[in-house]
Amino acid sequence: MKTTLSRRGLIRFASFMTAIVAVLAISNAMYMKKIKRLEYSVEAGYGSAIEDLAQSADKISSILLKGSYASSPSMMTRLSGELTECSGRAKSALQSLPVYGMSLDNLEKFFSQVGNYARSLSKRATAGEEISAEDREAVKKLCDCADSLSESLWELRGKFMSSDYTLGELFNNLDGAASGFISDGFSGIEDNLSEMPKLIYDGPFSDHILERTPAMTANAEEVEVGEAMKKAAAALDTEEKRILRCEAEEEGKMPSYCFYSEGGRCAVSKSGGYIVYCIKSRGVEDSALSCEEAVNRADEYLKALGIENMESTYYECYNNVCTVNYAYTADGVTYYTDLVKVAVALDDGEILGFDARGYLVNHRERSFEDPAYTEEEVLENVSGSLRAESCRLAVIPSDSVEEKLCYEIKCSDGERNVLVYVNAATGEEEDILLLIESDSGVLTV
């Protein structure tokens, strides 16, 4: 039986199809607009990160120059606080860029060392120790490094701005001719920073500590690349088949396999198969999670990797990324030498960064003499201007490879919280840190 449509039916059918086409066209336009808006926001995030990097290098240079002239402990303390803030901002900006295909160890080391070194000098000045000529020369060389870094970063920014390509296109095609200046620029920065002075000071990023043979890999068995790849896939939270092995392997004190996935990089130690670090680079445009929720997400990540007995100590939220610092704890003692850092995206809780180098270098079985002073005895000697709120044992680094068992006393002066560290063997004050607590994090200076 042959079916035909009436004229009215044809009109209705045509109207119906026209409506569908219109709806699809509107939906497609809205989708494309959304995609374009996301592209613009990612572009803006990359542009902001590059500018933050360059501005941070500028500011670090000027603060270091002031530090080379400073003579009072109060000024050194103020400048070291500013440097710590600047270096933290720079590290967060670097983490926001999709530079996972490049080795930027010297750049990361520079931003980690500069604030810690300044704080060490400040601590010595406060203790009445005169800053040596060698230290002032080191500060000047760091200032020169920061100047050179600033110049290179502003030059890179200029090339970004004058390029015919978007920043996303440039970063996504680092092997292409159009993106050559990115690879060349960062390679030049790495080469220049290789001339950094050796910094020996009281802190976890001191060269004498970084150059030690890591305790956890010293006697560990070597793992096959296939096993290391599985661990990298777990750390990057991706399928193993999406992992690409880079033929270039990291050597030095902690030889490692380097693996890449789309948007991520992970190093796994050849000895022991430990995750050394992993980084994911993407723009994070909003904060759907609170800092507390981000800390919980970081806790879950460490458990998934099988890293236990870690306590979150401090955290900082910047550019919609929360970086959580962890220290190892055992038998009521907190080991501030055994450090792990986890960076969490505040839009969806994705893990963007993990760094266990401090933990791998320092973590081992220890034995300390029983404290010569009781908790009650050290609390009696706390400054009268402070009210002690809690007390526990902690291990802190020193300017040698030795560690110090101390009482960590959390105090308050009514306006701010203060951490006082008293040597458990000698009863001497080893350090005093100010707790900076705000909506964006908890830090120490």
Image (tube, rainbow, N blue to C red):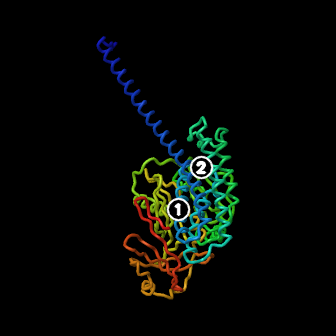
Task: Give above or below for 353 relative to 135.
Answer: above
- Residue bearing mark 1: 82
Q: Nearer the viewer, mark 2 or mark 1?
A: 1
* Amino acid, disc 1: Glu
Q: Residue 99 has which mark?
A: 2
Instruction: Looking at the picture, tell me which residue is in the foreground, 313 or 240.
Output: 313
Q: Which residue lies furthest to the left in this view?
A: 8
Determine if residue 1 is in view.
Answer: no
User: How far, Cα to Cα, is label 2 from label 1?
Assistant: 26 Å
Residue at left offset 63%, top offset 70%:
209
Check disc 2: other Cα within 10 Å, few if <14, some if 14-19, many if 20+.
Answer: many
Q: Kindly identify the residue that appears in the image at 55 percent across and 65 percent down.
A: 80
Tag 1, which secondary structure? Answer: helix
Residue pictured at 40% horizontal, 31% vertical: 27
Q: At which x and y percent is residue 68? A: 62, 65
Mark 2 and mark 1 lie on one chain; the one further toward the N terminus is: 1
Q: Closer to the camera, 294 or 78?
A: 78
Q: Can residue 371 be seen in this view?
A: yes
| Image location (x, y in percent) of residue 100 | 59, 50
Compared with 155, 215 (above or below) is: below
Location of residue 338 by image quarter:
bottom right
Q: Percent from the top left, x then y, of residue 225? A: 64, 57
**Count of numbered tags:** 2
Residue placed farthest to the top in the image?
7
> Compared to 416, does 282 lie above or below?
above
The residue under label 2 is which amino acid type? Val
Label placed on residue 336: none
